[in-house]
């Protein structure tokens, strides 16, 4: 671990969240080859505000299906109150009720990988929580400006509290 390359990290808030539903655009990425995520968002943005049962004001970047080689699926999404009339190019996801460690990312969106690395390398351990196998997500609200990449966002990591974490679940 190179401390110079790890972002400063404030302690997380521990939050319990009820189950919720997402509708969005999913793409698979190989480990370290996630440069396509901004263009995935560009393809998804025209759908925002036009999805049936959409909950306005918040978007999500959801990380799922992380394998042993750190390949993963990424979903650009909005919350919905029900699944109905989902366009063919979009997919849906049900997220179970879960406890999360919520970390703030206040810098430009281009530095989010540094914050993610800090969370996995020391943030969870410092918070005395262990990640569990459930979707992890970026939560973008009205503070985030997609035109400038500034304003901040939250990173929600599903956790079990009261344990000494040592590894990321696969």
Image (tube, helix red, strand yellow):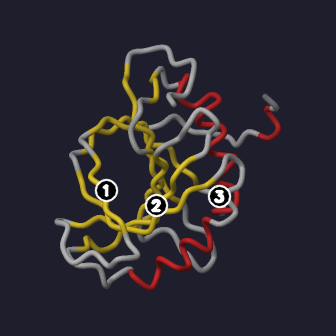
Real-space Cα separation, disc 3 to disc 2, in angstroms: 22 Å
The N terminus - image quarter: top right
Element marked by disc 3? loop
Real-space Cα separation, disc 2 to disc 1, in angstroms: 9 Å
Tags 3 and 2 in contact by the CB under 8 Å rule? Answer: no
Looking at the picture, does residue 62 appear above or below residue 6? below
Element marked by disc 1? strand
Residue 88: percent from left, percent from top: 35, 77
Q: Identify the residue at horizontal 38%, vertical 80% (top origin).
A: 48
Residue designated by label 2: 75
Between disc 3 and disc 2, the foreground one is 2
Indicate the quadrant where residue 42 lies. Answer: bottom right
What label does residue 112 carry, if any?
none
Real-space Cα separation, disc 1 to disc 3, in angstroms: 28 Å
Q: Residues within 10 Å of mark 1 (few under 14, many from 20)?
A: some
Looking at the picture, does residue 125 appear above or below residue 144? above
Element marked by disc 2? strand
What label does residue 93 carry, if any?
1
Q: Residues within 10 Å of mark 3 (few under 14, many from 20)?
A: some
Q: Identify the residue at horizontal 47%, vertical 37% (top origin).
A: 12
Residue 154: percent from left, percent from top: 48, 52
The answer to which of marks 3 and 2 sits earlier in the sequence is 2
Residue designated by label 3: 107
Residue 143: percent from left, percent from top: 47, 68
Residue 147: percent from left, percent from top: 59, 80
């Amino acid at each position: 671990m190179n401390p110079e390359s790890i972002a400063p990290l404030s302690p997380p808030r521990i939050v319990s969240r009820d189950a919720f539903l997402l509708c969005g655009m999913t793409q698979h990425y190989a480990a370290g080859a996630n440069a396509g995520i901004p263009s995935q968002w560009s393809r998804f943005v025209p759908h925002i505000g036009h999805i049936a049962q959409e909950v306005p004001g918040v978007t999500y970047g959801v990380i799922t299906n992380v394998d042993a080689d750190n390949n993963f699926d990424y979903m650009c999404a909005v919350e919905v109150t029900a699944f109905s009339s989902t366009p063919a190019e979009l997919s849906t996801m049900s997220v179970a009720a879960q406890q999360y460690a919520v970390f703030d990312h206040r810098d430009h969106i281009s530095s989010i990988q540094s914050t993610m690395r800090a969370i996995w390398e020391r943030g969870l351990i410092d918070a005395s929580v262990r990640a569990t196998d459930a979707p992890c997500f970026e939560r973008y609200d009205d503070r985030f400006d997609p035109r400038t990449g500034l304003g901040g966002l939250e990173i929600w990591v599903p956790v079990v509290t009261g344990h000494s974490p040592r590894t990321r679940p696969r």
